[in-house]
Amino acid sequence: MNARLFLLPLLLLTACKEETAALPAPVPITAEAAGHYCQMGLLEHEGPKGQAHLEGLPAPLFFAQVRDLLAYLRMPEQSHAVAVAYVQDMTGASWAAPGEWIRADRAVYVLGAGLRGGMGAAELVPFAAREDAARFAAAHGGEVRDFAGVAAAAVLAPEAPPPALVGGES
């Protein structure tokens, strides 16, 4: 009987470990990495980036900003299922040097802080811990949301053009 009690937690831990091991690891950004939508080099843009690993494909899709990755994840017309997506943790990082990769579905985001991502759109700032996101929001403004709490409209709605382009100015 005692052996059964010991084996059950071990089996559960093994199952969890196998699920995690099956997910592709995040890929470092290289000079060749280009944004999925813009096809521009990621190293040319500041701010946090994203990457999505699609089932059956050997390399991830990279995104020049987190907003673009979250928009991609919410679009129904994808050709492949997403195995896992990652964003860069901004805890202790700078806009010029974003942090380590964390799972997008486990990240906490600050929306409405007024920061612009690599492609100039309003950026969602990702954090690994809610406390860090709350400190950032207190200092820079915005709302703290978990992945499920980021509304599709926050990433899919078109943005107004920059003020310099409104009214025919250039």
Image: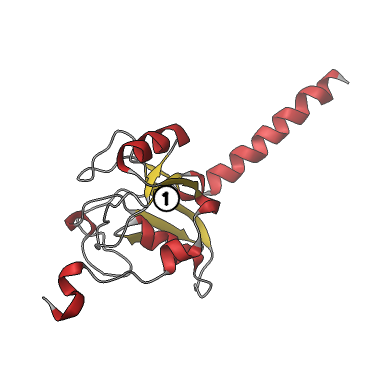
The answer to whether residue 18 of the structure is visible from this angle is yes
The one of 64 and 32 positioned closer to us in this rendering: 64
Q: On the rendered image, what quadrant is the N terminus found in?
A: top right
Disc 1 crowd rating (10 Å Cα; few below 14, some 14-19, many 20+) is many
Percent x, y of residue 87: 39, 49
Percent x, y of residue 28: 30, 48
Taking the image as shown, residue 132 lies to the left or right of residue 48, namely right
Number of callouts in the render? Answer: 1
From the image, tell me which residue sits under label 1: 86
The one of 88 and 7 positioned closer to us in this rendering: 88
Residue at figure coordinates x 49%, y 72% from the top left:
78
Which amino acid, by three-letter code, is at mark 1?
Tyr
The one of 93 and 4 positioned closer to us in this rendering: 93
Q: Work out which residue is located at the far left of the displayed protein and give it.
A: 170
Quadrant of the rendered image containing residue 15? top right
The one of 66 and 114 positioned closer to us in this rendering: 114
Percent x, y of residue 27: 35, 50
Taking the image as shown, residue 99 lies to the left or right of residue 150, namely left
Percent x, y of residue 131: 44, 32
Residue at figure coordinates x 63%, y 39% from the top left:
16
The answer to whether residue 59 of the structure is visible from this angle is no
Residue at figure coordinates x 29%, y 62% from the top left:
121
Q: Work out which residue is located at the far bottom of the displayed protein and give it.
A: 168
Residue at figure coordinates x 40%, y 60% from the top left:
69
Q: Which color scheme did the rendering employ for the protein?
A: secondary structure
Q: What SS does tag 1 mark? A: strand
